[in-house]
Image: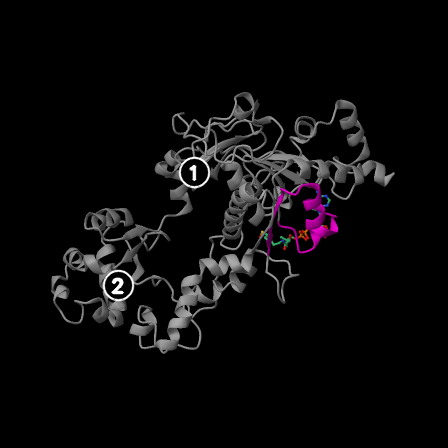
Amino acid sequence: MATESKRQKPKSRAAAKKPARKVVKLASAKKPAKKANGNGLPKPSNKPYGQAGLALQGVRILDFTHVQSGPTCTQLLAYMGADVIKVERPGAGDITRGQLRDVPGADSLYFTMLNGSKRSITIDSKHPKGMDILNRLIKTCDILVENFAPGALDRMGLTWEYIHKLNPRMIVASVKGFGPGPYEDCKVYENVAQCAGGAASTTGFREGPPLVTSAQIGDSGTGLHLALGIVSALYQRIRTGRGQRVLCAMQDGVLNLTRVKLRDQQRLAHGPLTEYSQFGEGVPFGVAVPRAGNDSGGGQPGWIVKCRGWESDPDAYLYFITQAPVWNEICDVIGEPGWKTDPDFATPKARLPRLKQIFARIEQFTMTMTKFEAMDLFNKHDVPCGPILSMKEIAEEQSLRATGTVVEVDHPTRGKYLTVGNPVKLSDSPADVRRSPLLGEHTEEILSKVLGYNGAQIAEIKASGAITAPDKSKAAA
Ligand code: CAO
């Protein structure tokens, strides 16, 4: 783990006013390590749960990420307690700071919602003094994370061999669009990955074109995969003492999340996919998995049905699953008790060709109530179903605030905003969710407190142009 003794103090997730963590000495630096058990492992802490520090406390990350995929990964690791130092180009920073801006002059929500709990340092990596700073950072960090276009890190001079020589313990984690192969040199954004990973061809309605999903499975999905690779590499490093490279290709990440469709592709060789509505409609299957609309992807048929108000409210719908064990209850509630014994409806197999008819009847019933009333009613009978929640409803949902899944943080230039907190809850490690840093907000703090530069050296670095944007007036003169 990072060796220098000044670390961050964990803060409660909601108290997110200041981005900079108060630097305190690691508990382990003050006290001798606890005596080990006979098996060499430390004794269980006797601190109350939630007060034994954060899961990744002591881990320092050199964050070279931008846009969404990489930042998702490092933000999650920061929520888990890692000290994430985001390196940005002087004067410009992560391009998303200025993209989709809603408040003039303030960092966009695109940026702020992907870079919480990090520190920002500006460094021109192509300036010799900038490279000196990076060298020092490499020596003091545990992990370098990047999602530049293929080859960009090498062009900066930061090849794996170079980094590994400076710090053999360094884990170098990368997101790329494609893994080794014909497309490895291509730049990739979210929807390209959704298309190349098999999600788009299997999303949407049969009659319509391929569809991308709003869930950012290419960017955020791959960032999550990368985070798992990083903590695995950290764990292995405990044994081996050395770092390794971690690579997640967005195509691979999307395919991993779309694996049920690769399952169906292989099933096609053995006959039609009977749980797809297409089967009941008598439409023959082609050579590849078709788009299945709102059919459920599993063995229990499901569909989206209208609820009261659907004519004016685009989200007045309920996802309804006709789970076999509760079929009798469904029949009773919707007023079709005869279906419990009718051979056309009594068994899951008999129902498969009639799914359209069944969901039309269920819909007739749910249209008499709101999606929330329907949810309450069917849940009393253990029927798996869920309201289609709009983003407005999610933003206002108090239970998500209570669990820290949606967190309001305060920002010096934009004011309060909502962000998605840590969706992974650890019982002994509260999430550390704080606002995103301003561009270069922690440059001096990191130079002095992390890297040990003195005042004169910092002044010299500043004058060199390695951490500041080029002076346009001078350039024009
Ligand atoms: N100082 C100096 N130069 C810097 C710098 C710094 N601090 N930070 C970045 N740069 C430079 C890089 O060195 C690179 O320069 P060269 O191309 O001259 O070597 C340059 O900035 C741009 O990097 P890039 O090619 O990664 O950026 P882009 O905007 O052209 O492409 C993207 C963006 C996302 C398409 C590409 O980075 C990519 O394909 N990444 C991998 C896949 C990925 O993560 N995609 C998800 C994006 S979210 O939808």
Q: Which residue is mark 1?
A: 406
Position of 373 with respect to 34 (left or right) is left
Q: Respond yes or no on whether mark 1 lies under 8 Å from ligand 1.
A: no
> What's the residue at 64%, 45% (across, down)?
95
Q: Residues within 10 Å of mark 2 (few under 14, many from 20)?
A: some
Residue sitting at x 18%, y 68% = 345
Q: Position of residue 199 (x, y in %)?
A: 47, 62
Vertical side of 125 occupied by 328: above or below: below
Q: Which residue is mark 2?
A: 359
Q: In the picture provided, is 237 more to the left or to the right than 440?
A: left
**Residue sitting nearer the eye, 133 or 186:** 133
User: Which residues, given as a range, are shown in magenta?
Assistant: 147-176
Disc 1 crowd, CA 10 A, few/some/many (<14, 14-19, 20+): many
Label 1 is placed on what type of residue? Answer: Val
Quadrant containing the N terminus is top right
Name the colour scheme. one colour
Sequence order check: which comes first, mark 1 or mark 2? 2
